[in-house]
Image: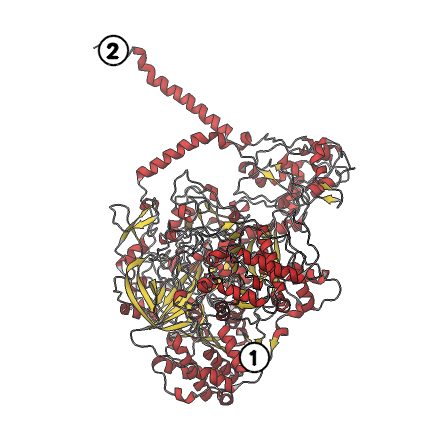
Amino acid sequence: MKRRFEHPPELTTGRRYWRSLNELADKPEFRQWVEREFPAGDTLIADGQTRRHFLKIMGASMALAGLGMAGCRRPESYLVPYTSNPEWIIPGETMLYSTSMPRGNGAQPVLATCVDGRPIRLDGHRDSPSCGGGSDALLQASVLDLYDPERSRFYKRRTDTDEITVEPEEPQGGMTNLPRPKPWGEIVKIDEFYAELEKLKRFHSGNQGRGLAFLTVPSPSPTKQRLRENLQQAMPNAFWASYTPVSDAEATRAAEAVYGQPLQVLPDFAKADVIVSLESDFLGSEEGGPEASGGYARGRRRLDDGEGKMNRLYVLESRFSVTGGMADHRLRVRSSDVLLVANLLALEVGKAVKSAGGKLAALPDLEKYEGAADGKVAEWIAPMAKDLAAAGPGKTLIVAGRTQPAAVHAIVAVLNEALGNVGQTIRYTQPVTPPANSLTELIDKIDAGQVQTLFVMGGNPVFNAPADVPVADALKKVGKVIRVSLYEDETTECAHWQVPEAHWLESWSDGRAQNGTYLAQQPMILPLYAGLSQLDIIGMLLGMVQIPRPEGVPAPASPENASVSSAMENVLREEEGEAAPPAEAAANAEAAETETGTAQTPSGAAPAPDAAPAPAAPPDEELPEINSMFLVQDTFRKLAKVTGPLDLAWKKFLHDGFWEELTGPSFEVSAPALQPAAVKALVAAQPLATLPAGQFEVTFYSDGKSANGDMVNNGWLQELPDPMTKLTWDNALLVAPADIPKLGIGPGDNPVWEETYEYNPRTGEVDQKVSGVDVITLYRFPMVEVTVGGRKLACAVLEAPGQAEGSVALALGYGRRRVGHVGAGSGFNAYKLRTAASPGYTLGATIQRIAPTYHLAITQEHNSMEARAQVRESNLETYEQNPTFVRDMGIASHMVKKGVSPKKWGYNKKDPAASFQPFYNNPYYSKPKSEQNPLQWGMNIDLNLCTGCNSCVTACQAENNIPIVGKEQVLYSREMHWLRLDRYFAGDRDDPQMVVQPMSCQQCENAPCETVCPVNATIHNDEGLNVMAYNRCIGTRYCANNCPYKVRRFNYFDYQQRPIDQLYYGPLAKKGMAESKQMVQNPNVTVRMRGVMEKCTFCVQRIEEAKIAQLRKAKGSKPELPPDGAVRVACQDSCDTGAIAFGNIYDENSQVSKMNKSPRAYQVLDYLGVKPRITYLARVKNPNMAMPGADLVGNILPIAEHHDDHGHGKDHGYDKDHGAKKNGHGAAEHAPAETGGHH
Amino acid sequence: MANLYPPSANWLPLKLVFCGAVFGGLLVVWIWYSWTPKYTRVGYMPSQPVEFSHELHSGQLGMDCRYCHSFVELGAHSNVPTTQTCTNCHKPGGVAANSPKVATIIQSWDTTLQQVSDEAEPIRWVRVHKLPDYAYFNHSAHVNRGVSCVSCHGQVNEMPVVYHAEPLSMGWCLDCHRNPEDYLRPIEQVTNLDWKPEDEPEGSRFAGMSQRQIGEMLVDEWNVHPPVGCAGCHR
């Protein structure tokens, strides 16, 4: 007989944890949704596949099988060895290399895992002095960009028919079959580009670089900086500009005002006891990097390691960010009100800290803010300031976010001075990205007709420039635009040449880490598509790198500088289709300038087929280098002051990835004296904003997975659920729940539940029509039109708990119009509303509801385990009084099953795990320990450290060959992530707290999935792993059905073999993975096929590798067990806060055993008796009890109240006084009375 | 009404059933046998681009397996030698330099640089032993622990052309994983494909012992517990 486990009743009253607003509201539709075993369109039949259709397909496959008998013989395959073995390479074995990834706020040290000469995984460099080995989703996913088959692969030249694609009027919904932009340009041979480059080089070195300009993204590479200096010498008139949409520019501008010189702020989160973030998302986005997360985690770890008190984090922000989720106190303020808050904070700090007055005098008119705020802000600031004062000088840290203007950063800088933090928790370094001209300056120069040749290298300015900076128009005025980029993008459409850029994993360079540490960047693979790096191009223009010559072209003749350049100028003119006026044949520089000024038509600028004469010799006597490695070597030689042969030092530098003498401290600058006048001027220039009634403030943010638009063609990132909204494949306008009615959206509209859709596999569309049988309920979200200063943008609305009222937020980087298949049609282009004057946020937006609706693929309700105290948290006070508070939490602690002997179901507080008698016991574990395998794997996840940054999810995807499934499939709950991050909101729907819980296969000892598999495809092994044999799986999905944690994933389609828009094609359709995509697969993990169940394996490939390494070492002796730390799982490797521990739980001294012994340890759904191998440590918040609402922080399920909720004395008999009020109550007290209640 | 069918038709259904059973049974037997790895794999002997004879090199000349398969003790894969390895002997003016069998090797030699030319094409050896994609075999875990090459690859030192000697099926793997004592041998004899227990000289600690005795001794001494769970090979 089927036994159905009766879960204890959920809490129905009072405060509780919830994953989505629907769950909070507990609508009947929602209950229906979660109670289905496989929600939404999770079964094939619902896809409009009828039985007849199925039989037809079956028939066809049978016929095929008959025809294909001849193919049954194994295909011949080949073993192709090297001709001579490269040093160190062992075929098939992984190699680790040090390199670094260039990023906006400095290079990030990277350890790349390579197999047979191709990188397959990237991780933070654990040994690097700049950070402790953390990574984030962007770094993890960057390796997929390298192998993206839709990268720019060819050298291309503009043709006359190329035009700028017009954006579709209506947003497309991002489903499938979107109109694709026309292919751009004609493919040319690489030699033609070299010839072009040769001409340009000759021309511009002859005219001192007049008319030559570069537009790049800020780069942390010292070599590039050195080349820029060389360029300045060789071609003094060349113009160098850089632009990136999101940067620390405002902070640097503030430092320039405060200290009189451009400095980069380097916060040290580890040392701070009290941290105040003014809308800085230092844990979530690129803003802080692994240094910030690691530092914050060290401050959080003090809870356990006893080195002082755990840090406390205050966050004031408009959008609920990951950092806000980790905050002990979070206040919703509009971005535009942060300036006011900063001033108020300064005022209160002045009152609380006696010594602060002198420094704070630099801020203008602080007194006028007395009483300027009301409500929560007023209640907040004073106790917060007192807390800052109480922490003592140099023990606090205030940081401001990138969305904030320089004035806020200046106030923060002064505050940090006043609190004595400078030199302690705040240090300053030279900016790692050297200053350059701005984009607007470049455009002015173009408008003045002074740019003839423009190299646009990296970035994507046509897409991501502010809406009021007409980049596309400006580029049309330039005679020759050479675009060097990873992808053909919007900027390519305005260019004359498209040059495939070498990915950072394909090129030589170097970089400065955030704290200044000098890092190596070495190629992991030769350029896949013959791309050139930016260093190559600049080096070639400067004659420092040799321009390769096509075969058959004679070697350079003798130099004849001046005449050559004038001749070249004529050639250029002829090619541009404008006859050179004879008067200017002398070719002076002015002539060139006037001429470009008139060259308005880009079509006329299309160069004719190569008519260039044989190139002449380079002007410099020195023989140019053959590749850019030598440029990096020269920089290294100078910086590291290496004299004599470079060999050993260079090898050590590449091996380590950094150079010891060039680490962080050597770049630090002691902050000069404050410049009160400049601060006053800067702060006074920024008026306080007032938001008119009926209008909104729009905040533009980076969501940590689009790289502001550069990485939207990356499937891993697109399908990654946003940490807070759990939104995949799109961005959406985040609106506070209280603001929703103001947009004209009714209670039934968000989302629309009632509508039903049928998926039409032939058109690939979800039709809005009700069909009798095959009905799928999908979320449809209302759309609005946002108008700011006459600029309009239609976008979908997502109700976002925790969003400040009056403020709406939109992530940058989505809504690209020229992008590959993956990024096509995803989201809405926030850049359209962004202006140069206010890049962080803008006021005065009006929002109007429009008729269309939009599908948003949100995973937050998928795989719901419903509220059964999966996440547990408390505050420091409770923890200190009752360290084992977790054991008083959860339904389990009070569970008595009616009619079952209490001895069987009694809750033993000393050993909660042993309290529950399961239906099934794994016989293996009833053997004495000496007969069991001494290796028993287990994992521990510290919720106090997990921020929900998503890097583990991407790392798992990279390590385990997890496919992406596309937006439609996510809508049907078919995402394949083995590891998901469950985000729970707690408390109030407008202003909730947040807890994140990583959830993957729990490797239950008594696994319910194993007992139901009819073919033994999932079984237990003697190391405690719940293993999957994919080739046995027949796809019944019983196991997923029986999994209480909902962590099993089924391959509904051949996600690996088919592009996501062709999943529904028939069996005869083309299959197969792009060759370049095959290269990113981990060769040690099976690539699963359709119809197979899969799930987390605890990275069994790494476990086996570690064990085999011990065998190899042992040879003819007894092998030792792998030492603790020898097996690191992928999620653990990627975690920059170190929240995940993995190891042998039978080894008393392993890290995981030690953590499991923590009083905060608990297991999810432990009362089922499945004995999960993952243990969680409860989150402990550190509220300041003087703050308003402090009693609720981390206390959403207060222990005592929780008990009361359960109806004492009604159906189970506990002593009424037990609970948190009475500390340390033991098992005896907890033992339920024999017969029901006794009072 | 006349009988449409003669009386013998009464037997027709029975005959049909009988024939069906016989043919069906034969079909089952045919599939049973001919779809097994033993039938499909054993004996597979593709012709190689270079006529390399293991019999000559390993058998007659006595070269150790690891001279060419140099990473077998270090990695999961046992590598196929690079052209450079061949040219250690077979370069112009070297061993058998004029033999047409080594012409491909000789041609890839760059006489000016005295090394294998950068432009040389690698030799595309036809793969003989191939496990399914979802099975992961690690050479180093076996050859370092007393499993001889001969156990899986057969008497390669007697093969002029390499062929598939053993089925390499899962059941076949498990035979050894369940009873390793039947196959283990002293570490130093792993690449000696002709080793027999009775060859152990006087004075050796294995002298006079049978395979099983040696194997049991080694299993005990080395703590050999070959994995028999799925995750040992399937990841």
Residue A1165 relative to residue A118: left or right: left
Q: Nearer the viewer, mark 2 or mark 1?
A: 1
Which of the pair B97/A128 is nearer the observer? B97
Q: Subunit of mark 2? A: B
Residue A300 percent across, percent down from the top left: 50, 71
Q: Chain of mark 1?
A: A
Residue lying farthest left? B1
| Distance (Cα) linking label 2 and label 1 | 116 Å
Disc number for residue B3: 2
Percent coordinates x, y for residue A910 in the rendering: 45, 65
Q: Is residue A1120 left or right of residue A140?
A: right
Residue of label 1: A261
Task: Name, please, the residue furthest toward the right.
Answer: B93
Q: Is residue B20 above or below residue A489?
A: above
Image quadrant where one finds the N terminus of chain A: top left
State yes or no: discs 2 and 1 in contact (Cβ < 8 Å): no
- Which corner quadrant of the image does residue A728 belong to? bottom left
Quadrant of the image for the C terminus of chain A? bottom left
Examine the image and state in which quarter residue A691 appears. bottom left
Q: Residues within 10 Å of mark 1 (few under 14, many from 20)?
A: some
Q: Using the image as rendered, state which of residue A770 and residue A1062 is in the foreground.
A: A1062
Q: Mark 2 packing: few (<14 Cα in 10 Å), some, or many (20+)?
A: few
Q: Could you tell me the amino acid type at mark 1? A: Gln
The location of residue B37, given as percent across then percent down, is 54, 33
Residue A162 in view, yes or no: yes
Are tags 2 and 1 found on a single chain?
no
| Res A1227 seen here | no
- Helix, strand or loop at mark 1: loop
Percent position (x, y) of residue A363? 47, 86
SS of the residue under disc 2: loop
